[in-house]
């Protein structure tokens, strides 16, 4: 095992552990913080796999923006300090579905690749990713802008029914 | 690429974490401890703190909208970075692509503006 | 480990990083951290002295020479203050929030280039902790993680003012992060790289000199000059991002006491202050790197080749950073605080659209320079005109709604509102006001004659 392998395993363990804590904790805001740890560990995984740009994008977008939005949303509704007993529901069905899906996917991967080694592609620097993205993947990129448009319009319609379009 | 350029970042992170945790912990030991009820109460402009609203209170929805706008533009910025770095190789084609992309997001932005989503009265 | 023989240019490139022996890395890491702490100690002193100078008072001048040790004394004092954990606080998060702030602020310093290649104990090594190909993203990621320290500190205090302050502050920071992130796109486009040392080298490479009428003119390739709009927007958003005056709304004393740090005391409070000042220094250093040519000497000095070699780089770097920090302090000494709605309007409605249009305009110009066929050129110019036309047509109108009549507003108030005085109330002039006017009258008689001295004015002068 090389150092990179050890790092991969350790980061994977952190990600899984934090993910389990997200769903089991009964403190709402702390669940968000465990999510930060989980997503950060995933970013570390990307980094070890030499996808530099994607790793930092993961930190910027998911840790820096999406979880902030989640925290905002939690605080908009309720953000009690301390335990919320109503979060302690029996989670057996969810655990079965989630754990089953995870284990099943892992088994599928293990079976598909066995012990065949795959060489790492060239490092995902900004330059290589940029040329790739804007030459070969133009359509998904443009469709994404429509998705963003829909997200914003949806956000405003859901959140501000009180403000109509002005005359 | 090896990971060795990242090792000093982790090192600085660890040093800062050690320093911060050490000072937070040492303040607990070094400082005097003469607590009373008033000191531990939440700071407010009255003698008795006003009761906390049940469930932690609620916030104006505008904050949510701001965070949503932030995510959308953050994603746009993230796509602008690799585009800007490799702009010289992409040339005209990349330029037209990005005009279309920014144009579409700009429509959403103009819509939010028109609907008053950017108003903080 | 490689020991490259000769450096023709002193510029470190990405290949030079990651080869240091561990003890040199350790020295650099410790040096960067010491720099952060020293910058805070001196920065607070500098700010208080400069603001004092601007307000015609001495500022701290007792502790040490020129009061230099004032901040150290304050920090020591804070260490021996009572560490209060409020009753309603979430203990663990309350404990960790200031450390998150400090860690994020300090980590960003890891990719700042302080100088060129130097010889350190016989090793050729760049004066920079480390550099990666996406270094600027590391800085942005660190600053976006810094939000957590503030929003969690506000929330975990279990108190109203910090909660409001934390939320305000995080909304402010994410708003200005958008402006900041957009403003550096132009830098990446011009430099063609995201590594900080690469951007410094690219700025040196774009120096231009021209001769006009026998005179040699020299234009430094600083992006602050080439990309002036980006620099201005970057600096404005940096002030907003670091919660500094005039954008220091999260700690608006008159509204929110001390914002998210109201409930913090002792060294935890000191850590928040440390994070604030380190952030200020970090954004100044980033501005220096991205826009002001980094550690390279400014123009008249740079004629001397030795100015850009070895440890001299540190001098120019620190000079530029101190200059920018001075501008921060200057702003604080000059401008009043913005209102929250004005502040958000500036970020979302002014900086953002200007930024986007500027990026597209710059990209268009660069394409125009490269394209040779006339059809494409006219196509781009025509397209630009079309876009401008469309924007002016579809610009979100700012037509003001007519103000609602007073009576309607009164009727629309919800049940149980506070009673209003009658709308046609005429307040009789108070007798004290009349007396004051009568007293002031003689002073005004003199009109334009300043040599008329009466008793009231001398009394006022003595006050």
Image (cartoon, coloured by chain):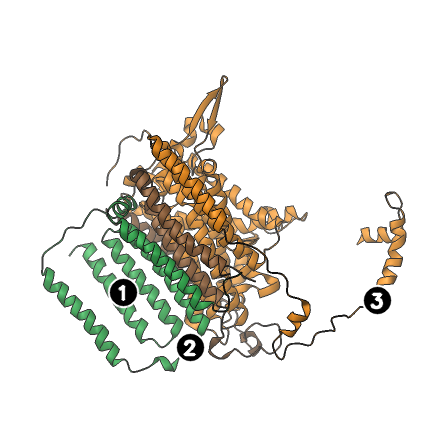
- The chain under label 3 reads C
Residues at marks 2 and 1 on the same chain: yes
Q: Earlier in the sequence, mark 2 or mark 1?
A: 1
Residue B79 in the image: state x and y as whole percent: 34, 50
Q: Tag on residue A89?
A: none
- Give the crowd class for mark 1: few <14, some 14-19, many >=20 residues within 10 Å: many
Q: How far apart, in angstroms, are the residues tagged by discs 1 and 3?
A: 71 Å
Residue B44 in the image: state x and y as whole percent: 59, 72
Residue C28 in the image: state x and y as whole percent: 36, 46
Closer to us: C343 or C73: C343
Q: Is residue B91 above or below residue B116?
A: above
- Please indicate whether residue C453 sits to the left or right of residue C71 in the image: right
Q: In the image, which lettered chain appears brown?
A: B
Q: Which residue is mark 2?
A: A82
Q: Colour of chain A?
A: green
Q: Is residue C354 above or below residue C166?
A: above
- The chain under label 1 reads A
**Residue at (45%, 68%) from the top-left corner?**
A159
Q: Is residue A141 above or below residue C288?
A: below
Q: Colour of chain C?
A: orange
**Residue at (70%, 74%) from the top-left corner?**
C420
Residues marked 2 and 1 touching at CB (< 8 Å): no
Q: Which residue is mark 3?
A: C430
Q: How far apart, in angstroms, are the residues tagged by discs 2 and 1?
A: 24 Å
Residue A156 in the image: state x and y as whole percent: 44, 64
Secondary structure, mark 1, is: helix
Closer to us: C358 or C168: C358
Q: Which residue is mark 1?
A: A15
Residues at marks 3 and 2 on the same chain: no
């Amino acid at each position: 095992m090389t150092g990179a392998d050890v790092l991969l395993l350790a980061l994977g363990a952190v990600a899984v552990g934090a993910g389990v804590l997200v769903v089991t904790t009964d403190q709402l805001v702390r669940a968000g913080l465990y999510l930060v740890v989980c997503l950060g560990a995933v970013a570390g995984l990307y980094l070890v796999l030499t996808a530099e740009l994607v790793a930092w994008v993961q930190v910027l977008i998911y840790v820096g923006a999406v979880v902030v939005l989640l925290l905002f949303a939690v605080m908009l509704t309720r953000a009690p300090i301390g335990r919320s007993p109503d979060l302690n529901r029996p989670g057996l069905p969810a655990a079965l579905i989630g754990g089953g899906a995870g284990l099943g996917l892992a088994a599928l991967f293990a079976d598909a690749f066995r012990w065949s080694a795959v060489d790492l592609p060239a490092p995902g620097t900004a330059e290589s990713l940029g040329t790739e993205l804007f030459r070969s993947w133009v359509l998904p990129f443009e469709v994404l802008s429509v998705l963003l448009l829909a997200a914003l319009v949806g956000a405003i319609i859901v959140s501000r029914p009180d403000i109509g379009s002005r005359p | 690429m090896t990971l060795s350029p990242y090792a000093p970042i982790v090192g600085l992170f660890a040093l800062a974490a050690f320093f911060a945790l050490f000072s937070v912990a040492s303040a607990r030991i070094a400082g005097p401890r003469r607590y009373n009820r008033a000191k531990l109460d939440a700071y407010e402009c009255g003698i008795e703190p006003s009761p906390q609203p049940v469930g932690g209170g609620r916030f104006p929805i505008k904050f949510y909208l701001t965070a949503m706008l932030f995510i959308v533009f953050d994603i746009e910025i993230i796509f602008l970075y690799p585009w800007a770095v490799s702009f010289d190789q992409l040339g005209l084609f990349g330029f037209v692509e990005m005009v279309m992309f920014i144009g579409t997001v700009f429509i959403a932005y103009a819509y939010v503006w028109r609907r008053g989503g950017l108003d903080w009265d | 480990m490689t020991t490259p023989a000769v450096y023709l240019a002193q510029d470190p490139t990405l290949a030079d990083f990651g080869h240091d022996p561990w003890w040199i890395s350790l020295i650099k890491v410790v040096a960067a951290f010491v720099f952060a702490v020293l910058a805070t100690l001196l920065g607070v002193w500098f700010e208080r002295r400069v603001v004092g100078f601007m307000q015609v008072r001495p500022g701290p001048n007792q502790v040490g020479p020129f009061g230099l040790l004032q901040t150290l004394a304050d920090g020591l004092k804070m260490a021996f203050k009572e560490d209060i954990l409020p009753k309603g606080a979430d203990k663990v998060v309350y404990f960790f929030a200031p450390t998150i702030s400090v860690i994020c602020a300090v980590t960003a310093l890891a990719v700042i280039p302080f100088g060129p290649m130097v010889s350190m104990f016989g090793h050729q090594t760049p004066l920079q902790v480390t550099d990666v190909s996406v270094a600027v993203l590391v800085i942005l990621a660190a600053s976006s993680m810094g939000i957590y320290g503030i929003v969690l500190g506000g929330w975990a205090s279990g108190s109203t003012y910090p909660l409001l302050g934390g939320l305000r502050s995080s909304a402010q920071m994410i708003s200005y992060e958008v402006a900041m992130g957009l403003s550096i796109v132009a830098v990446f486009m011009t430099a063609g790289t995201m590594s900080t040392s690469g951007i410094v080298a690219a700025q040196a490479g774009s120096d231009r000199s021209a001769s006009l009428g026998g005179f040699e003119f020299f234009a430094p390739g600083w992006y602050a000059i080439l990309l002036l709009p980006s620099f201005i927007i970057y600096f404005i958003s940096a002030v907003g991002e670091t919660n500094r005056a005039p954008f220091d709304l999260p700690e608006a004393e008159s509204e929110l006491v001390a914002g998210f740090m109201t409930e913090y005391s002792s060294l935890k409070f000191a850590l928040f202050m440390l994070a604030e000042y380190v952030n200020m220094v970090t954004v100044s250093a980033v501005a220096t790197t991205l826009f002001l040519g980094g550690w390279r000497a400014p123009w008249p000095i740079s004629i001397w080749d030795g100015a850009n070699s070895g440890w001299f780089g540190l001098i120019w770097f620190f000079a530029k950073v101190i200059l920018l920090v001075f501008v921060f302090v200057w702003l604080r000494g000059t401008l009043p605080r913005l209102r929250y709605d004005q502040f958000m309007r500036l970020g979302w409605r002014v900086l953002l659209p200007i930024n986007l249009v500027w990026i597209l305009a710059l990209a268009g110009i660069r394409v125009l320079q490269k394209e040779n066929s006339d059809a494409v050129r006219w196509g781009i110019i025509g397209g630009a005109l079309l876009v401008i036309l469309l924007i002016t047509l579809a610009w979100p109108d700012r037509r003001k709604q007519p103000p609602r009549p007073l009576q309607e507003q009164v009727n629309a108030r919800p049940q149980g509102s506070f009673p209003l005085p009658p709308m046609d109330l005429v307040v009789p002039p108070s007798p004290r006001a009349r007396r004051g006017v009568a007293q002031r009258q003689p002073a005004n008689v003199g009109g334009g004659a300043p040599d008329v001295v009466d008793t009231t004015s001398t009394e006022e002068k003595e006050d």
